[in-house]
Each structure stands twice: as C-alpha cells, then as structure tokens.
Image (cartoon, helix red, strand yellow):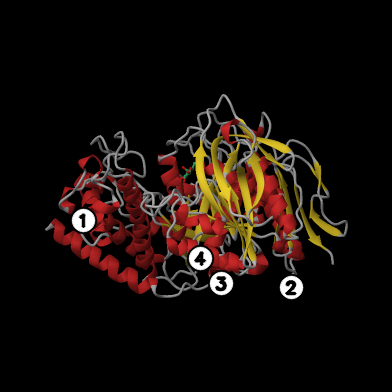
Amino acid sequence: MKNLRIFSFLLVFCFSGVTLFSQMKKDPSRFFDPAKLTEVGTYYYPEHWDESQWKRDFIKMKELGFEFVHFAEFAWAMLEPSEGVYDFAWLDKAVDLASEQGLKVIMCTSTATPPVWLVRKHPDVLIRHENGTKMDHGARQHPSFSNIFYREYAMKMIEKLAQHYGKDKRIMGWQLDNEPRPHFDFGEDAHNRFREWLKRKYSSIDALNTAWGTRFWSQIYSDFSEINIPRLSQMFMNSHQILDYQRFATEETISFLNEQTRTIRKHTIPEQWITTNLIPEYSDGHLRYIDQLDFHSYTRYMVFGERFGMGEKGYRLGHVERIAKANDFFRTVDGVYGVMELQPGQVNWGRINPQPYPGAVRLWLWHVFAGGSKFTCTYRFRQPIYGTELYHYGIVGPDGVTTSNGGLEFVRFINEIKTLRKAYNPSVSNPKEYENRRTAILYNHENTWEMERNRQTTEWNTERHVDKYYNALKSFGAPVDFIDERNDFSVYNVMLAPAYQMIDDALVARWRDYVEKGGNLVLTARTGHKNRMGQLFETQFAEKIFSLIGAKLDFYDLLLPHHPDNVKFEGKNYSWTSWGEVFVPERNTETWAAYEGDFYAGRPAVIHRKLGKGSVTYVGVDSKDGNLEKEVLKKLYKKLNISLLDLPEGLHIEYRDGFGIAVNYGEKAYVLPISDKSEFIVGGKSIPKAGVSVWNEKK
Ligand code: GAL
C-alpha cells in the first residue's frame, strides 16, 4: 500500500513537473512598479497578540511608512486546528484591518510548523537523525520533506489557503515555508525515495557501482534495495555516495517547494507572485534554482556576535560582503529578488548578541537596495513576549508601541526612498564605466561540497577562496554576477571560475569557445581535477584543461601553517600555505608569478595566455590575504583597458536605476571617488563610518 502511494506520488510529481517546466517563466519584474523603486514591509504574527490590538498595530505600521505586512508564516495549528477543519476567520480579519491601512499582504505557507495532531497521528513525519533518534513537536522545522504523509497534509492545507486567498488582490504574493534547506533525514520514506532517485539516475546497479567506485573496499551492491543513506558521520564513508545523497536531499527540498508552488498556482490571480526566503548559504547553491518560483528572496542577519567586519568592533556592522554577495548571488537567477528578513536590532540566537552600531540598520537597508532588491521586509514588527525569541528586537518593543532605535532607522530609510522616488528618471541608466567592469563568477555549490569533504589541508577554505576574488572585484567598483552553467557566458567580458574542481568535456569546450570568441577566463587552483562524480580522470592529473590553459600541471603542494612560502608577482612577495600548483608552461604562455621558496623556487604559479580573441589566466596558488589575487586581476583588467576604482576595504559603490549608492562598512570616513558633477540626494561626497551616500550623475 505504502509503495503504491509512493509510486502514484512520484508519477504526479514527475508529470506536473514536466508540464510546468516546459512553460517559459515570464519576466518577474512585471510584479513591481518601477517608479516605486523598492518597498518596505514587516513580519506580523496576529495570532501572537490580542485581537483588540491588531488595528492599533496596523495604524502604527502605516504611520511609520511600511507598505506591506507578512502573515501566517508559522500558523498551521491556527489555520487547521484539527484534521480537515479550517479556520481562516481570524486571518481574514487581520487582512481586512491591514488593508484598511493600505498595507498589502504577503501570505505564507506555514509548513515549517505542522500541528501536533498531525505529528502524533503520523510520527514518521518527524525527521530521523542518523543515530536513530527523532525530532519532536515543540519547535519548528522538524518535519521531513520526504515524508509522504507530511507532503499530503501540507498540500491539502496549502490548497485551502490558496482557494481562500488566491483571488484576493490585497495579497501581493506568497512565501513558501521558512528558510527551507536540505534536511538530512534518515527516515524510511527518505530511504525509499533516495533509492527511487538512484534508480532514475542510473540505468543499472552496475552503472551505480561504477559511479560510486564500489570496488574500492568491497562496497559493491547487487540491488538498489541494499543501498542506505550514507552515514555522514561515519569515518571514510564513500564520498561519491555522499555527493549523490547531497544532490538528492537538495532536490527533495526543491521538489517540495515546487509542489507547493503548483498547488498555489492552481488558484491564484496573475498579480500574485510566489517566492521563498532562503538563507544565503553558498553550499546550498542550487536552491537558487527552485525553477517554479517567480523569483528568489533571501534572509540576512548581520550582527550576532561573530567577529565579522572591520576592526575590533566591526561585529556591530557586520562584513560588507555578507549583503553584497547575497545581492549578487540571488539577483542573477531571475533578474529580480527581494529580501525577506533583515534584523531591526539585536537578535537572540547568537552565542553573544550585541547591539548593532547606530546607523547599521539603515546602512544594510541601503545596501540591499543598492544590489537591486525590489523589496525589503523586516523580521519582526513587535518584540515577542513569549516563545523562543524573547530577546529578539522588533520595530517596536515589548509594549507594542515604543519604536526601537532600529525601527527609527527603518523609518528614516523609508522616507529617504520617498525622496528618491521623486528623483527617479526611467531614462537614465547606469554609467558605462560601471557596466564595463561587470564580471561573472561561475559558481557551482557541488564543487564546494566536494572540496570541503576532501580538503587535503586544514589551510583550505573554499568559500574564503572565492571571496578573495569577489572582494577584489568589489574593491574595483565592479558589478559582479554569480552565474552557473545554465547562463550564457558570452555576455561577460571577464568570467572567473574559481576552484572549479568538477568538470566534463562539454564544459571545457564551452570555456574554450567563450575564450576564442573574445572572453577572458580566469581559472584558479584546484580547477578541472575531477569528473562530475568526484572521480579523477584516467589521464595525467588535470590534463583535461592543459590545452586550454597552455600549460601542464606538474604537481601541487600544500604547506604547513607555521611556515608560509612566497610567490613573487611584479617584484612583490605574497605569502601562501594552502594550495600551490606548479606548471610547465607552453612556449606562448606567459608566467606572471613564480614560487620563491623550496625545491620548486622560480617555477610558475600564475600563468596567462592569449587564445583566439580572448585570454586564459590561471592562478594556481591561493594566497593568504587575497592581495595576490587582487593584483593579478588588476593586471588583467589593465590589459583589457577596463578602468577600475581602488576602493578601501568596506566601501562599496553600486548603481541601480541610474542612482549611485555608496555604503561604508569601514572604520573611518572616506571621500568618494566620483565626479564633482554628481548631485547628492542622500549624504555627500564624504561618507562617514556606517554612512550612505546616494547621487545622480549629472551629464
Ligand atoms: C530567521 C528565521 C526567522 C526568525 C529569525 C530570528 O533565521 O527565518 O523565522 O526566527 O531567524 O532572527
């Protein structure tokens, strides 16, 4: 019976997936009025407060300038208090009262918090850990995306919600679940679905044995039914099997969200959009492609006591790259993105939860805007007085009426946006020099999974490696688009593919084609070592890219932390420990940097060659502080006649809708390197710490 259910479930899923996937996604910018530039909203949980206070709270939101409100994110138990019995009356009242104040509504699917009746009736909905224990009711995010009952009940509830609100013009859009990400679940349904997934992927068990290299240590399978989800904590567990399991767990999340989208879309008017709120964890990268969403949104917390940011107290502002990179990562997926959660003050969940620096909240709001966001929503309006998040700040404090300092910064931003709307001129576009610097970073989270599992040295960190290039580009004032292999490479003059470990012939051919037609490709250490299953090629190490980079890789070396070595580039030394590749270049390949120390002193670490109308640069070493990477890129852009800025760390400049926007996460004030003809709308040419400047460039 259960197998039959699984089968029919898969059939429905595959069929509807195929039909919808073939429909072209319509441009999601249609949902947003360009003249508004951006809109600001706030989370509100009517179910947490006495009904008599709702109206007062919506009036306050309106007075503060918020334009929309976010409802029902964790409300399943109130919406379906017992099985099949739905209650929307309370939510209807909240929608009525909010819209009386002119507030639009984001409606949520509350799938992160199933009601207790469901959990007790079907305990298998709970995620099972690797050690056999299960999660329980009493928190959130405890159900398994693979559990058949959970998915059935979730879709029934979502369908009712969509029938109820799908034709309501006051609802601007939908948010699915909350911060969904792959769950590592060891339940029975997850096992069954993993085996089914493998059967679809591999034509036979022999094909799977080959892909997983199971002859190694006698791991050979004779039937799919023998396969279990890999024990992630077991030492030396088959890494090819883990790679497939990570892919499966990610696809489970995507399929769950796609199923929600299809369920909602049966009942909605075209004006309502559908998104979800993702945590920018770059190893969950292909959650960027939850293909049936209208666009992707992200959540970002900047201050939670970690030593991010510049200087001793940089933790009060957070690191500039955390918002910048999230903007550049999500914007490129659909051309449109929103930010669903931005903290209005202290949070409760860090190990230490300090106050943000005065002005920090406004700085983040402007930074999100600078990346192109269509809206920003804050978590949350009222500070809660019960539950897990008691110490979490809101726009107003626990009394429900006193605006917090962060709340006042939201108000300031909202008012500044109103001024900007008046200055908006749709015919003005971003400056040419800015657009000329636009650079792509080709990124695939699967490389990150693979390298983090097989680091080979404690000195290696994949995300930090990518950041060295990213931060260099931002210091040049370059707009950056994180793209993946679904994108067209040819629109970028320069494309970086840092540590692109897993490749195939088709990708190498695309890279070559891109370069021959005029593109400038930058590849970096660890690129091209493995196939898509994480196995080495039966060739010389990394041979697949030799003819592209114009060199042979002789060997790679990894140093101990206590004794870094140097690489010399244009007369200056740069130290490294984590990864260094030593090349034998072809005759026409230039050596840009060479190793200084040890038995391979004088041999190439950074090489460059022309190919067709373009060029390939290979940076085979990962420097300690990223300065080598920055200087190498500078040299390349100079060769290409692309003019660069030289911004100090923490100062970013972006353009959107014709406006220049600068944000300063640095420790001191700076003078902006922009034309004197610029007309400032916010701030000025000197930008203080935590300051923002916004200008129009007068022609
Ligand atoms: C987020 C989460 C929110 C809320 C918030 C508190 O990660 O999505 O629901 O818990 O943290 O800062």
Quadrant in which the C terminus appears: bottom right
Q: Which residue is mark 1?
A: 206
The kind of residue tagged 2 is: Ser
- Give the number of the mark in front: 3 or 1: 1
In whole angstroms, how far apart are the C-alphas of marks 2 and 4?
36 Å
The kind of residue tagged 1 is: Asp
Say if mark 2 contacts mark 4, CB within 8 Å: no
Mark drawn on residue 73: none
Q: Which image quadrant is residue 151 in?
A: bottom left
Secondary structure category for the residue under label 2:
loop
Q: Which residue is mark 4?
A: 510
The kind of residue tagged 4 is: Arg
Residue at x-position 74% and y-position 59%: 642
Q: Which image quadrant is residue 573 in?
A: top right
In whole angstroms, how far apart are the C-alphas of marks 3 and 1?
49 Å
- Give the number of the mark in front: 2 or 3: 2
Left or right: 219 in relation to 162: left
The kind of residue tagged 3 is: Arg
- Give the number of the mark in front: 2 or 4: 4
Ranked by sequence position, the earlier of labels 2 and 3 is 3
